[in-house]
Amino acid sequence: SPVMEAVRRFAEEGRYVVGVCNGFQILTEAGLLPGALLANLNLHFTCKEVGVRVERNDLPFTRLYPRGQVLRLPIAHGEGRYYADPETLARLEGEGLVVFRYAPLKDEADYNPNGSLHDIAGIVSEKGNVLGMMPRPERAVDEVLGTTDGLPFFLGLVREVARWCASGTTPLRLLLTFKPTPITTIRSGAATVSAKIPQTLPPSRKTSLGHL
């Protein structure tokens, strides 16, 4: 579709694109990420909290997590089983493109909620700018939701936006409506981000962050 052609160009320019849940499925169907999301092995829509281990913390999405940390994140899907052929799986593992993996929260044996191969919960493109994941970090950003384990995911992106705005070296485009405002300190558990985004940006530095 025309909109996905625009997203593809956006990603090819090195801009950040995040696909969560059905967004992950869209990214695979559009060819921006390898593999496919199939029906859960139990053939039921599954809505619960699961354990998700951080496999990489060298990306804007994950740099505020310690590598190996097991997050408690919600899932809500009927087609979340990650599948890829053996060659693709070997490449994902060999090149370190698996970012999130299902893991036990309390030593439970049945921790993979959908039958995803290699317990894969999220992967990233070779350039590191296109991320797809089935768990829902946006539903884990406030104590009232039961967990704040998803908040550092977004704080890492905020820090990346602040870094680009402050550097003035390369334009960072924001697909989402974004009004630059000062950010002093944002706290979430052990994660603390302090930054300041300029109130005004010259036209050459209008930018965008894609989120599906």
Image (tube, grey):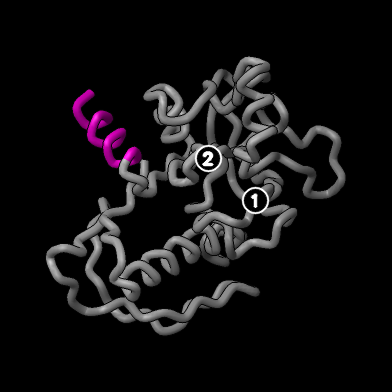
Disc number for residue 56: 1
N-terminal-most mark, 1 or 2: 1
- Residue at the spot 36% in from the left edge and 81% down from the top edge: 196
- Which image quadrant: the N terminus? top left
Q: CA distance from mark 1 to mark 2?
A: 10 Å
Q: Residues within 10 Å of mark 1 (few under 14, many from 20)?
A: some
Contact between marks 1 and 2 (CB within 8 A): the answer is yes
What kind of residue is marked 2?
Answer: Val
* Along the viewing direction, whichever of 136 and 179 lies nearer the viewer: 179
Judging by the rendered image, the residue that carries numbered circle 2 is 124
Q: Predominant secondary structure in magenta?
A: helix
| Magenta span contains residue 4 | yes
Residue 90 percent location from the top left of the image: 68, 25
Q: Amino acid at mark 1?
A: Arg
Residue displayed at 38% across by 44% down: 17
Residue 212 lies left or right of residue 62; in this view the side is left
Whether 113 is drawn above or below 128: the answer is above
Is 204 positioned to the left or the right of 152 in the image?
left
Q: Residue furthest left?
A: 203
The foreground one among 116 and 110 is 116
Magenta segment boundaries in residue numbering: 1-12
**Horizontal placement of 117 versus 161: left or right?**
right
Q: Position of residue 32 (x, y in %)?
A: 41, 30
User: What residue is drawn where x is 31% and y is 76%?
Assistant: 197
**Quadrant in which the C terminus appears:** top left
Q: Position of residue 177 (x, y in %)?
A: 23, 58
